[in-house]
Image (cartoon, rainbow, N blue to C red):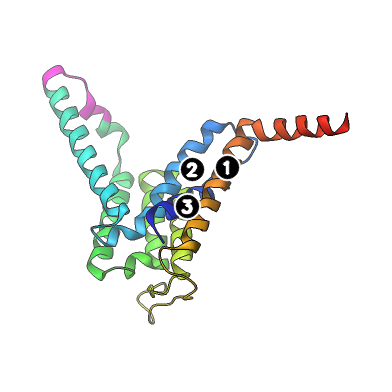
Amino acid sequence: MTGKTHIMVGTAAALALVPLSQPVASCLPFAIGGVMGSLAPDTDIGTSEGSRELRRVWAGLFVVLASALVADAVLGTGVCDYARTHVGLEQLAGLATLVAVFALGRASGHRGFSHSVVALAASTLALRLAYPLLATPFAMGYASHLLLDLLNKKDQRLFWPLGRGVSLGACKASGVADALLCLAGFLVCLVLVLLHLDILPGALGSLAGLRLR
């Protein structure tokens, strides 16, 4: 499937986990985690949306870290002391594991290790160490990517390192099915956000009131 379809469906899957009793602001980390997970499997190819976003993230992190170190050295902002206090071995281990998962995915080729249940579990556990709040929505986005790609004609190594690749061969990676899934994902995201804003229940209530008159 295309990148935008993975994003829409992955975000919808992650947002579905947010209790409707929670305010709309609570949807943000779930949306972020869902997007991250939905793009993560395709970091195994350099031209994918996931790889491009990952490169932007690394570039952004480099700029932020370099700026923070310069500010700390020149202005004495205390950034380094704060990092030493709040960033522990668990976070570093999680980040290192994520890097290792992505590196192994690139080395194994497209729809190899990165499109497996093992990679899903390893990257989710790594993110749980690095930033627990994003781990569950990340897993939902990642799982949605694997499920969508099962519909394609090209095999993926879902049970890596065991066996061959699997696919259902139901549709092409782009086409009518892809567009419909993208639209469905977008509509689910929209409905869930409206429910958290209490707009949809209010609108339905008003409509019901008009019909009773």
Q: Earlier in the sequence, mark 2 or mark 3?
A: 3
Quadrant where the image shows the N terminus:
bottom left
Left or right side of 20 for 55: left
Q: Earlier in the sequence, mark 1 or mark 3?
A: 3
- Camera-near label (2 vs 3) is 3
Residue named by callout 2: 30
Quadrant where the image shows the C terminus:
top right
Between the C-alphas of marks 2 and 3, the distance is 10 Å
* Amino acid type assigned to the residue bearing label 1 in the image: Val
Q: Which of 59/46 is in front?
A: 46
Residue 27: give x, y in percent of width and height: 52, 38
Between the C-alphas of marks 2 and 1, the distance is 8 Å
Q: Which of 58/82 is in front?
A: 58
Judged by its main secondary structure, the magenta piece is helix
* Amino acid type assigned to the residue bearing label 2 in the image: Phe
Left or right side of 176 for 22: right
In this view, the residue farthest toward the top is 75
Contact (Cβ within 8 Å) of mark 1 with mark 3? no
In this view, the residue farthest toward the right is 213
Disc 3 element: helix
- Range drawn in magenta: 74-82
Give the numbered dot on residue 10. Answer: 3
Residue 119: give x, y in percent of width and height: 37, 63
